[in-house]
Amino acid sequence: MKPLLGLPLPHSNSICKLHISLYDLRQGGRQWYAKLSSFLISNNYTISTVDHSLVLKRIGSNTTVLLVYVDDIVLTANDKAEITYITHVLDQHFKIKNLGNLTYFLGLEVAHNSSRIHLSQRKYTIDLLYETSMQDCAPMPTPMKHSSRLSTTDGTPLNDEEASAFRRIGRLIYLTNTRPDISCSVHNLNQFVSAPTNNHHQVALCILRYLKGNLGFGIFLYNNSSIYLKAYSDSDLATFPDSRKSITGFSIFSGESLISWKSKKQQTISKSSYGVEYRALVATTCELQ
């Protein structure tokens, strides 16, 4: 920061010390989180060790959860009195605005009734189709052919302009937050972002055409589901011809609600389908634990 004209400084190498954190400064977010978290801790909340943006409070059978993203907070609890209390004290200290029931948050659309909650990213998907000029494309029934084996050497390399357009497809990764049906295809395709070819571009278009046919797909979370965990695991042998590595895939349910899923390239190379399946089961078991 340059000192103001006419401001006397004791030394030529003096600097300014901030007494108030400014909104656009890089350290502003850190200062805000430190202030908010210390306030919540003083009100008997604890910061989750798994995710520092998750704040919890448990008293007996009552649980209160706050999810913090910069200055946006999602609050839920099974005790309405605690919701009223924490909302009141937050408003006293920070002058918050209560927007009511959650309907939209960071591109996630939330619809709920008495029995379930539906999470989707319909608007995000529509915006992505318009950005890639695919809003009028013909839908496809699947995001990717099962027999597809993408390689770095197949096809013609894209020029700089086409490659730049292809890399914008990376926004599909955020869409996998509510669309496990495209997780495998998206993460498979993102292996080739650094050097895309026309074959990779065609696969990206196939994913977009698949999304056009089911814009509102998402996840259902049921309020009467049991807490009994069940998991499904699968793998695909030597999916990547270049490295001969395989893919691990799993999905985990709490009752009827899907709560965790993954499609990821395995770190090691297996010579048999037995070894591939075993590693997929190990990854699934770790996630369950």
Image (cartoon, rainbow, N blue to C red):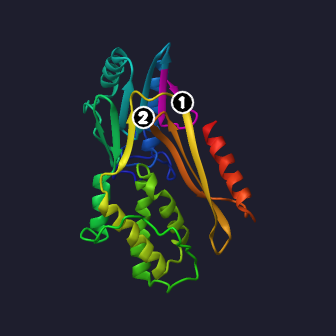
Q: Quadrant of the C terminus?
A: top right
What is the crowding at mark 1: few (fewer than 14 residues within 10 Å), some, or many (at least 20)?
few
Residue 20 in sight from this viewpoint: no
Q: Nearer the viewer, residue 63 or 233?
A: 233
Q: Which percent across, then down, holds residue 16?
A: 45, 45
Residue range in magenta is: 45-57
Mark number for residue 67? 2
Q: Is residue 122 above or below residue 226?
A: below
Mark number for residue 228? 1
Name the residue located 44 percent from the left edge and 85 percent from the top edge.
159
How many angstroms separate mark 2 from mark 1 (CA)? 25 Å
Side (left or right) of 250 relative to 9: right
The disc, 2 or 1, on the residue closer to the chain's N-terminal end is 2
Mark in the foreground, 2 or 1: 1
Q: Which percent across, then down, holds residue 137?
A: 28, 71
Name the residue located 30 percent from the left edge and 61 percent from the top edge.
213
Side (left or right) of 131 relative to 226: left
Magenta run includes residue 159: no
Side (left or right) of 30 relative to 281: left
Q: Is residue 79 above or below residue 112?
A: above
Q: Nearer the viewer, residue 224 or 151?
A: 224
Magenta run includes residue 53: yes
Identity, as a three-letter code, of the amino acid under mark 1: Tyr
